[in-house]
Image (cartoon, grey):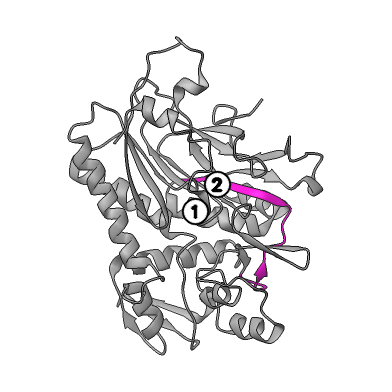
Amino acid sequence: MSDGAHWSRRNFLSARGLGASAGGALGVLIPERAAKPAGSEKARLEVCYARRAMACEFNVFLPPTTPEGMAAADAALDEIQEIEALLTVYSTGSLMSYVNQNAYPGPLRTDARIFQLLQRAAELTAITEGAFDIAAGALVKAWGFHTGPRRVPDEAELQEALARSGMRHVELDAVNQTVRYRAEGLEINLGAIGKGYAIDRAIQRMGKEYGVGSTLVQGGLSSMYALGAPSEDEEGWLVGIQSPFDPTRPVATVRLRDRALGTSATNRQYFETAGRRCGHILDPRTGRPAQTDLASATVLAADAATADGLSTAFYVMGLDKVRGFCHNHPDIAALLVLQPGHSNGTPASPQVVTFNLTKKDFQLAG
């Protein structure tokens, strides 16, 4: 636990712990005192509770006047750890690993929480035309992004992994809460959506059990949900979006209130071979690292699971496809940082494109 002065000194604009977190992780919380002139308001002392889960640090920020704040934060962090134990594919004893091992030929009845998340993931696959697909565990392993070593698979191995990947091979029965894999060897990996889902569950638990109406729950530097507003600031929680080229500098700040944010990029998770850079975000349609004109993709949505999933999809889709998607989905907002080669920007001053964000929602860094 720490007070506001403590967590501001810890430098939330740094990339501390970033390498261990999934997704490239760029969204960070900015203390209000860093954003406003000294003396312009009373010093806020939001209380931060932290615990490690899902290979990153989760933080729960609460106003100091929150009744039973410590108990509420503990419940939220407990929920996150429970979801991790349920969803992880890095433990053969998790329920998700059991599903992967037994859903072919299926059908297999599963936990309601896993089934709910699989349904949402299937919906995101459909609306992104396959740019987001959790049933790509075979591809993740083929490239060595599961447990390593990272490598380029040969063409035969790649095509074999592609053949047993994709939500088209997953059958979900809502009546019986069952899942069936129609391809032997198919594996689901929830890394691109699980962190956001855990945050959503934590928010729900704090509200249901403790009546919390103001909190920000942050997973690593990639995923967060802001409920209500912080102390003495009705506009919402101020969040910075780091530059994918310089993690010490923000490219923009965003106001969050009753909204989630997710960011995806590959500037921290990649390997190089034969002069080529291979990022960890794979295009599930080709089975290869995404070739994109985006350096990072940030999504604002009603829930953190959706924000996480769509940020991955948007990174894969690229600028033009994201423009069309946001035009047809006005409830989804995006902040995209373009690659220098695809804009007039440079790493020192990257070009930022936004959709469905008002001037009240965000501000570009000076």
How far from the left and from the top, in percent, is residue 340? 78, 45
- Residue 11 is covered by the magenta coloring: no
Residue at 73% x, 38% y: name it.
Answer: 351
Q: 329 or 234, which lies in front?
A: 234
Q: 339 or 177, which lies in front?
A: 339
Q: Quadrant of the N terminus?
A: top left
How far from the left and from the top, in percent, is residue 276? 76, 64
Q: Residue furthest top?
A: 39
- Look at label 1 and name its amino acid: Asp
Residue located beneath label 1 in the image: 308
How far from the left and from the top, in percent, is residue 246? 65, 40
Residue 124 higher or lower than 349, as above or below: below
**Along the polypeptide, which appears first: circle 1 or circle 2?**
2
Label 1 close to label 2 by CB (< 8 Å): yes
Residue located beneath label 2 in the image: 299
Q: Give neighbour class at mark 2: few <14, some 14-19, many 20+ (Cα, 10 Å).
A: many
Residue 237 higher or lower than 187, as above or below: above
Residue 120 higher or lower than 177, as above or below: above
Q: Magenta segment, which residues?
A: 284-301
Residue 9, can we see it? Answer: yes
- Residue 287 is covered by the magenta coloring: yes
